[in-house]
Image (cartoon, rainbow, N blue to C red):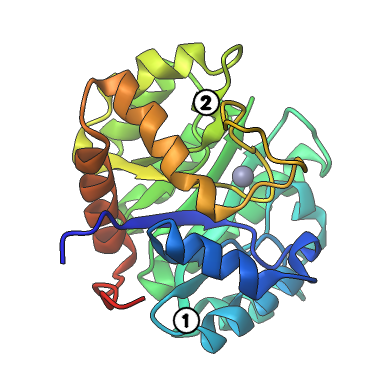
């Protein structure tokens, strides 16, 4: 079977906006060729829900275990062992999402740095890669990452929206780069279209970040702003245009890369 297969490495499928039709969302994704998805854990609670979903859909859904920098203040020394135990779950393929977000500053920066460091240690202990979030915090982020890099098995800078300097710094650290529908944005995605050309094919991954970041160039535009993993091929098309490659090549390479980093099996061809 050489049907085009996609792996969505970042979907917030535990989000309550899917509570009424989660199964239908998954079916639509499968029909669009999105054969495997990694459900982002962004708090202890959402990690637990992501694991439940992954257990209910083995071979299709996987989970990450982490606390988003927005919630860093909730990751106390008492809460950490619980997260670490979840990170060891067989359904969990990465630690995170974790990192720093100085754009919103929903948690104090010192607590963000502490939570990030803890989760990198946690990743190292599990031997699983890290799923990284960074916004407006590049210098601190890089410094903390460098401290832990030798102990880490690898990772992905998810929802990358920055410039060539950040891209090159992450590539130098051996990280992969996750591209979302940000690239489909005719206004703010333009810079990313240049940046994406400089990512080696074996380091590039695709993610919907649904329910967020609905690609803006869908025709006809969906009735709601809620994004779904079935729109991931639209992200792949924008990446393909930017790189001057066939979309099938982008799909094949990003799927291979995602399966390799997260240790996913080959999807069943009858999904
Ligand atoms: Zn994020």
Relative to 231, 112 lies left or right: right
Residue at screen point 76% across, 41% down? 223
Where, quadrant-wise, is the N terminus in this rendering?
bottom left
Under circle 1, the secondary element is loop
What is the C-alpha distance between the residues marked 2 and 1?
31 Å
Query: Residue 126: x, y in percent?
Result: 41, 74
Under circle 2, the secondary element is helix
* Mark nearer the N terminus (2 vs 1): 1
Callout 1: 10 Å neighbours few (<14), some, many (20+)?
many
Residue at screen point 64% across, 25% down? 136
Query: Residue 26: x, y in percent?
Result: 56, 68
Instruction: Check disc 2 and report the residue beneath it.
Output: 184
Decide which of 16, 51 is in the foreground and name it. 16
- Closest to the camera, between mark 2 and mark 1, is 2
Where, quadrant-wise, is the C terminus in this rendering?
bottom left
Instruction: Check disc 1 and report the residue beneath it.
Output: 91
Query: Residue 3: x, y in percent?
Result: 23, 59
Q: Is residue 80 visible?
A: yes
**Within the image, what quadrant is residue 250 found in?**
top left
């Amino acid at each position: 079977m050489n049907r085009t297969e996609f792996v969505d490495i970042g979907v917030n499928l535990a989000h309550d906006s899917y509570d009424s039709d989660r199964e239908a969302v998954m079916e639509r994704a499968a029909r669009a060729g999105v054969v495997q998805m990694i459900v982002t854990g962004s708090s202890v609670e959402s990690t637990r829900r992501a694991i439940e979903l992954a257990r209910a859909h083995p071979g299709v859904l996987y989970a990450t275990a982490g606390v988003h920098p927005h919630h860093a203040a909730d990751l106390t020394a008492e809460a950490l062992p619980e997260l670490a135990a979840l990170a060891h779950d067989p359904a969990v393929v990465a630690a995170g999402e974790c990192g720093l977000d100085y754009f919103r500053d929903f948690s104090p920066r010192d607590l963000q740095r502490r939570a990030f460091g803890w989760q990198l240690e946690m990743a190292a202990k599990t031997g699983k890669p890290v799923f990284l979030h960074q916004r407006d915090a590049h210098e601190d982020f890089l410094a903390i990452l460098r401290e832990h890099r030798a102990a880490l098995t690898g990772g992905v800078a998810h929802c990358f929206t920055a410039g060539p300097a950040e891209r090159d710094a992450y590539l130098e650290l051996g990280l992969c780069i996750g591209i979302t529908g940000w690239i489909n944005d005719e206004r703010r995605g333009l810079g990313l279209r240049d940046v994406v050309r400089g990512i080696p094919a074996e380091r590039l991954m695709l993610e919907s970040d649904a329910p967020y970041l609905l690609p803006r160039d869908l025709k006809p535009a969906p009735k709601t702003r809620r994004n779904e993993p079935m729109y991931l091929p639209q992200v792949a098309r924008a990446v393909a245009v930017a790189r001057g490659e066939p979309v099938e090549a982008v799909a094949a390479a990003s799927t291979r890369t995602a399966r390799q980093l997260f240790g996913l099996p080959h999807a069943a061809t009858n999904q």
